[in-house]
Image: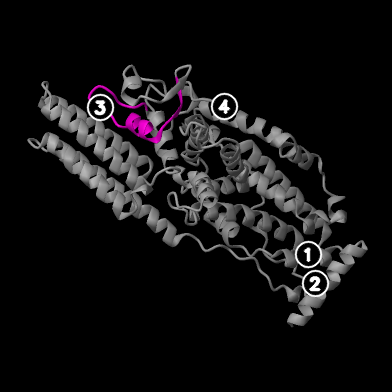
Amino acid sequence: MLLETQETMPQTPIFSSMLGSSCSGQVQPDMGERCGDPVYQDGNLVSGSLEALIERLVPTMDYYPDRTYIFTFLLSSRVFIHPHELLAKVGQICIKQKQQLETGAEAEKAKLKSFAAKIIQLLKEWTETFPYDFQDEKSMKELKEIAHRITQCDEENGTVKKIISQMTQNLLMALSARSQYQEIREKFRQPVADKGTILKNKPQSTQKDILSVCCDPLVLAQQLTHIELERVSNIYPEDLMQIVSHMDSLDNHKCRGDVTKTYNLEAYDNWFNCLSMLVATEICRVVKKKQRTRMVEFFIDVARECFNIGNFNSMMAIISGMNLSPVARLKKTWSKVKTAKFDVLEHHMDPSSNFCNYRTALQGAAQRSQTANSNREKIVIPVFNLFIKDIYFLHKIHTNRLPNGQINFKKFWEISRQIHDFMTWKQVECPFEKDKKIQSYLLTAPIYSEEALFIASFESEGPENHMEKDSWKTLRTTLLNRA
């Protein structure tokens, strides 16, 4: 599906300067002659050579690319060319345009200033939306060279120079902030592996658990949403595009862009796994069946509140934790649980028909977000691993280039639309008051390894069949050998 209207890409505060009134990707009156070979269907750009697409990116005296095209092309270009190489090509086109204005019969300072203003606007949008494209010296060098040439268009009052100086300062601040985040990012919480003492001493019923910190499902769901939005705020469009560029690098054995580990994606994925394991840990380590039943029902209520909020990622993590084998096998516990609400949740997350039920719920939340008057109604946190799989699937079923060698831009319209939706949702400011005590527990409470979970599970409800008895025997032997 192509981006045919502005409504296709909902505006957000951070993108308000990027998405103007023209977001269709439609051909401009003079673009056919200027670019030569781009192909349009129903007025929408669907393919073109890299050179033609780059030309379409660069403003002229009478033309400025629509904002959706800028976002989509800059996002997808890294699959084909390094940012510093793209900057160099943009710089070369700028030189030619500047020379034509200076030597043409209609050379006027006003036209040079107008041209300079458009180039600055492009660079401003680029540095604000994709600051990490300028993390290496080569990119910064190309940016400075373009800026230097543009500054010459307005040497009298120095207005252009001031704007460029401010743009550069903002860029450096953005890069510094992101660098600091990577340096201080939390170390991945490791599961507690050695639970040998559980064989001799069961945990005391008075041991601190989640219910002793927060017994209100709605409040816990709100705190989980706080954590989700904080983590997702550190994910950038180019991080998500690495799914495409990284795969191409592996397939073609050549580097296209930065294919180092994306810590922001990794950290967010790790949070999902930690939450799932925390849920399982909280359930399995409860000694008494009645209290364990209460814990299961509590998490079911938390997951339901997450669903109502629009926090599908935490909801899925909680369901995943309760479906882990050490929890799922606790039949005596589950027999006491009122499972009607859990069945509804599992229905929403039913994987059949490519998670059709979940996608319907997500679409409903997205529509609510678009017309919302409060941040509470704007919250949309998709199941992240499914979102990633969708982008990967789009990448794998559509080729980057058509048989004639042109870039399949129709593919990248759709990928950028999905990424832009995600960027829109992540900008929502969390409306719930932060509870440091609850969040500290969620982020630092010990979580059991899979092995420790099974030990706790078997201690609570003994093995019921030969397979479980063999597993329990193996676990006991392993732990005794360690001792």
**For mark 4, what is the residue?**
367
The tag earlier along the polypeptide, 4 or 3, is 3
Label 4, label 3: how far apart the Cα atoms are: 37 Å
Disc 4 residue type (three-letter): Gln
Label 1, label 3: how far apart the Cα atoms are: 66 Å
The tag earlier along the polypeptide, 1 or 2, is 1
**For mark 3, what is the residue?**
60
Q: Which sits in the foreground, 386 or 284?
A: 386
Q: Nearer the viewer, mark 4 or mark 2?
A: 2
The spot of residue 211 in percent (x, y) is 68, 55
The tag earlier along the polypeptide, 1 or 4, is 4
Describe residue 189's horizontal placement relative to residue 161 as left or right: right
Query: Which quadrant is home to the C terminus?
Result: bottom right
Number of on-image labels: 4
The spot of residue 168 in percent (x, y) is 25, 46
Q: Magenta part of the protein: which range?
A: 44-66
Mark on residue 454?
1
Q: Nearer the viewer, mark 3 or mark 2?
A: 3
Q: Helix, strand, or loop for circle 1? A: helix
Q: Nearer the viewer, mark 1 or mark 3?
A: 3
**For mark 2, what is the residue?**
475
Asked if labels 3 and 1 touch by Cβ distance under 8 angstroms, the answer is no
Label 1, label 2: how far apart the Cα atoms are: 8 Å
Asked if labels 3 and 4 touch by Cβ distance under 8 angstroms, the answer is no
Describe residue 292's horizontal placement relative to residue 313 as left or right: right
Identify the residue at horizontal 34%, vertical 29% (top origin).
56
Identify the residue at horizontal 49%, vertical 43% (top origin).
241
Disc 3 residue type (three-letter): Thr
- Residue 394 visible in image: yes
Q: Which sits in the foreground, 434 or 404?
A: 404
In the rendered view, how is the structure colored? one colour
- The quarter of the picture where residue 276 lies is bottom right
